[in-house]
Structure formats: C-alpha cells, structure tokens
Image (spheres, rainbow, N blue to C red):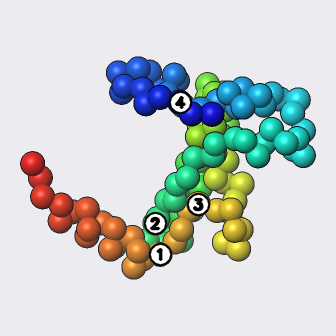
C-alpha cells in the first residue's frame, strides 16, 4: 500500500499508518496473513547507559498506561510497547545501550553546520 507524501500541516493522526489500513482489527489473530502486510516503523533509540535505558523503558510504560493514547496508530503502538522488550537479550528491543555509539551520534550531529 503506497501512500503519497502528506504535508506537515496535516495532523499527525492523518499522517500515521493505522492497523485498519491493512485490514487488522482487534479480532485479527496473530497467525493471520494480514499481519505480514503491515508497514512497521523502523527505528532505534540509542542511549549511553543502562540507567538511561531504564528511564526510557519506564517512560514507555507510563505512556502505555495512559488511557488517552490511541494505539491503533502503528508507530504509537510500537513505541509504547518498548517496555515489553526490556530484557537485554530480546532481539526485538529497539533501545540500544552503547556509550560509544551514543557519543559518536551526539558528536556527529553537534558538528553539523547551521544554516
């Protein structure tokens, strides 16, 4: 499913993918073939320490427990469920603890020339 690029002035709710865009409902079972068509958001969060990771995980759990959050939006649902993947050995975790990678990213972005 290809979607044309929407301008930023259009609300985020209209720019994000929803499960229903792929025919997924709350009654769709995990083995249903429709899940293979879902366009998952690709992202990684890099933090320098395990303590920072614990803080991010706690924030994600806090967001998850808020009733106002609409988890029908795929990227929202992915983010708020990061706390489910807290075990370091979990291959699905998108929170990476790496002091070197974190500092190289911060240094790289802080050196960009401002226009």
Tell me the SS state at disc 4. Answer: loop
Find the distance from the CA under tag 4 to the CA under tag 1: 35 Å
Query: Earlier along the polypeptide chain: callout 1 or callout 2?
Result: 2
Q: Nearer the viewer, residue 31 or 91?
A: 31
What residue lies at 54% left-to-right and 68% top-to-bottom? 96
Decide which of tag 3 and tag 4 comes sooner along the chain: 4
Which residue matches tag 3? 94
Q: CA distance from mark 3 to mark 1?
A: 12 Å
Q: Nearer the viewer, mark 3 or mark 2?
A: 3
Q: Nearer the viewer, mark 2 or mark 4?
A: 4
Residue wearing tag 2: 47
Residue 2 x %, y %: 56, 33
Q: Earlier in the sequence, mark 3 or mark 2?
A: 2
Real-space Cα distance between discs 3 and 4?
25 Å
Which mark sits nearer the N-terminus, 2 or 4? Answer: 4
Which residue has dot 1 on it? 98
SS of the residue under disc 3 = loop
Q: Could you give the CA–CA distance between mark 2 and mark 4, rounded to whole angstroms?
A: 32 Å
């Amino acid at each position: 499913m290809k979607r044309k690029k929407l301008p930023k002035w259009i609300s985020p709710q209209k720019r994000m993918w929803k499960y229903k865009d792929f025919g997924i409902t709350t009654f769709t079972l995990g083995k249903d073939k429709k899940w293979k068509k879902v366009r998952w958001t690709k992202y990684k969060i890099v933090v320098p320490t395990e303590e920072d990771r614990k803080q991010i995980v706690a924030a994600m759990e806090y967001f998850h427990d808020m009733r106002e959050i609409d988890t029908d939006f795929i990227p929202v649902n992915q983010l708020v469920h990061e706390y489910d993947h807290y075990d370091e050995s979990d291959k699905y975790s998108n929170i990476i603890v790496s002091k070197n990678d974190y500092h190289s990213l911060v240094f790289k972005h802080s050196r960009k020339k401002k226009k």
